[in-house]
Amino acid sequence: MTELLFPPGLLLVVGALLMPLGLKIRNLLIFSLPILCLILVWSAPVGYVVTLPFLGFELEPIKITTTGQLFATVFSLMALVGGIFAYKQASTLELAAAFAYAGSAIGVTLTGDLITLFVFWEIMAIGSTLVIWAAKHEGAYRASIRYLMIHLFGGLLLMIGIAGHVVETGSIRFEALSLDSISQYLILAGFLINAGAPPLSAWIADAYPEASPSGSVFLSAFTTKTAVFTLLVAFPGTWLLIPIGIYMIFYGIIYALLENDMRRILAYSIVNQVGFMVTGIGLGTEMALNGAAAHAFAHIIYKALLLMSAGAVLYQTGKRRCTDLGGLFQTMPWTALLGIIGALAISSFPFTSGFISKSMIAQSAADQHLIIVWFALAAASAGVFLHAGIKFPWFVFFQKDSGMRPPEAPRNMLVAMTIFAIFCVGLGVYPEPLYAVLPFAVSYEPYTAAHLVAQFQLLLFAGLAFFVMLPMMKRTLTISLDFDWFYRQLFPKTGNASLRIIQSFNSTLTDTAKTVWRNLLSTFQTSRLSRYHLAESWPTGSMVLWIGVILGGYLIINAII
Amino acid sequence: MNEQNKRWLLRKENIRTLWITFIITLIATLVAGLFVHQHESFGIEDSFGFFGWYGFITCVAMVIFAKLLGLFLKRPENYYENSSNNDSSKNGTHHD
C-alpha cells in the first residue's frame, strides 16, 4: 500500500495549469491524469486520513470514505471520457478549465473538513465559469457572469455558515450536521444552491446551454452532483429535503416540456434528476441513500451521454432549437442510436443504469409508507420519459425532415459516446459492481417480475401519452420565465429607476447646499469681518506648514520635558 | 421525394406498422400485469393496469399543466436581449 499524501483532486487542478504548455503535453495530461487520479483514489483504504495543522485547526485534506470514493470514481471517469469527447474540438482554455473544475469536484469528495471543502468549492465555481466562458460568444460571456454571481452568492452563504458553525461547535469536521442553528441552515442553503434547488434553479438552464458543445458535457456532471455528495454526507434524513426534491423533479419536467432549445431541455432534466437524489437523501434510509448515490453515479454517465449527442448535433449543424432540427437520424445514425441509449437510461428503462438506481429511492418511500411521495415519484418517472426520454430524441433525430444532412459526428465524439453507452447498458444488466461500492450494504433486487411489468407499463403508456398529445407539444420560438427574471429583468430595471431617483435627489441636495454656501459666502464677504487677515481663505500649503510648525514645537517641548 | 426513396422510417405504411406494434406491446404489458402481484402495500397499485393508466393520466396532466403555465411564462426568445442595451448574437455554437 502506497502512502497517499497528495490529494488526488489537486492532481487534476495542477495538471490543468500545465495544459497551455503545448498540444502534446495537453493531450497526454487529458488521458493520463484521470487514470492516475483513479489509481490514487483506490490506493488508500476507507478510513484513511491525512491531517494538516492550520491556524489551530486540524485540516483533513484527504479523507477516504465509501461515498467519496464512489463520487471521485465517477468524476474521474467523466473527466477522462469527457476529455476524449472534447480534445480535438475544444479550446485549451476549455479543457484546462474543465480539468481544474473536475479536480476540485474530486477534491470536495475526498475531504474531511469544511475549510478544505470550501476552498475546492470556490475553485469549482471559477473553473466552471471559465468552461462557459470558453465558448467565446457574447451570450456565453453574459451567462457565465450570471452563473458566477449565483455561485459566489452560494459560496458566501456557505462561508458564513461554516464560520458560524465553527464558532458554535469548535469543529471543522465535514460530517453529518444537525440543523440546530442558523449556521447549519446557511450551509444547507449553500449546498442547495449548487444542487439547483428552488428558488434559484434557473442558473442551470440559463448557463449550461450557452457553453460549447463539449463544455456543457463537463458542466452537467460536477457542480450539481458535488452538491448531492455534500448533502448526502452532511444532511441525510433531513425531512425538508423531500419537498424540495419533489419540487425540483416537477419543475424540471414542466419547464423541459415548455422548452425549445435541445440542450436547455437536458439542462432542466438535470434539475429533475437531482430532485430524485435530493428526495432520496431526505428519505434518509440506508436504501434511499444508496439509491441517491447510485443514481448520481448512473446519472452523470447517461446525462453526459445525452449532452454529448446533443453536442455532436450542435457541432455538426450549428442549430440548437427543436424547431430547426429533425430527421437527423438519416445521416447521424450513430449519434442518434447512442443518444437514444442515454434517453432510455434517464427514463429508467429496464436493462439500463437508471432502472437499477432510481427504483431504490421509490422503494424506500414505499417502505416508509410515504404514499404521497411514492405516487409523486411514480408520476415523475413517467414524466422523465415524457420530457427527456422521448422528447429529446424525437425532436432532434425524428419529428420532421429538417432538410439538413449533416455528416456523422467526429470519431473521438463517437468513441466517448460509445464508452458511456456501454456503461449505461452494462450497469443496467450487471449492477453488482456498482452495488458493491455503495455507502451501505445492498439488499435490493431490481429485476423482479412485478417491478419489470410496472416499469414497462408506466413508461410505454407515458410514451403513448406523448404521441397522443403531440399536437399540444408543438415547439414554439419561446423561452420561459423563471426566477432569473428577478435578476435579469426586474432588478436591472428597478435598479436603473432607483439609481435615477437617487441621482436626482443627490443633485437637488448638492444644488441647495451650494446655493446656501454661496449666499453665506457673499454675506460674509460684504461684512466687516472679511477684512481681517485670519478670515481670508488660506492655501492648503500654508496650513500644512503651520501644522508642521506645531508638531515640531510639540516634539521639542516633549524632548525637553 | 416519392415514397420509395424515403427512409424506411419515414414511409407512411411503416409508421402504421409501428403504431400497431406499439399498441400490441401496450396490451401485452397490461396482460402481463395480470400475472404479477404488485406489493407496495397501498392497495391501489394492484388494480388492473395501474401503472399503465396512472402513467398515461399523469403524463397528460403534466402536458396540459405545462401548456397552461406556458400561457403565463412564455416569452419571445429575445426577451432578455431587448431589455439589455447590447446587440449580443445569441448564437449557440462556435467552431474552432
Image (cartoon, coloured by chain):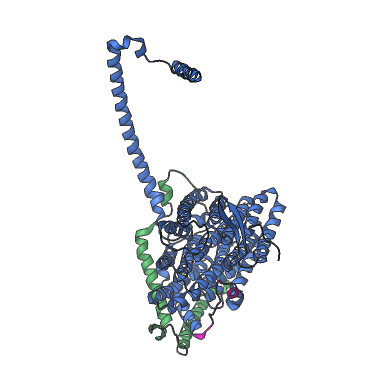
Circle count:
0
Question: Which residue is drawn at the image coordinates 38% and 47% (left, top)?
Answer: A491
Q: Nearer the viewer, residue B27 or A104?
A: A104
Q: Position of residue A496 (x, y in %)?
A: 37, 42
Q: Position of residue A397 (x, y in %)?
A: 54, 67
Q: Quadrant of residue A458?
A: bottom left
Q: Nearer the viewer, residue A99 or A304?
A: A99
Chain A: colour as depicted: blue
Residue A167 drawn above or below residue A412: above
From where the camera sits, is residue B6 visible?
A: no
Q: Is residue A436 magenta?
A: yes
Q: Residue furthest bottom?
A: B35
Q: Which residues are magenta?
A: A433-449
Question: Which residue is drawn at the image coordinates 37% and 65% (left, top)?
Answer: B67
Q: Main secondary structure of the magenta part?
A: loop
Q: Quadrant of residue B85?
A: top left
The N terminus of chain A - image quarter: bottom right
From where the camera sits, is residue A84 visible?
A: yes
Question: Which residue is drawn at the image coordinates 31% and 34% (left, top)?
Answer: A505
Q: Is residue B18 magenta?
A: no
Specify whether B36 is left or right of A520.
right
Chain B: colour as depicted: green
Residue A34 drawn above or below residue A536: below
Q: Residue furthest right?
A: A24
Question: Which residue is drawn at the image coordinates 43% and 48% (left, top)?
Answer: B81
Q: Nearer the viewer, residue A369 or A316?
A: A369
Q: Position of residue A446 (x, y in %)?
A: 53, 80
Q: Position of residue B43 (x, y in %)?
A: 38, 84
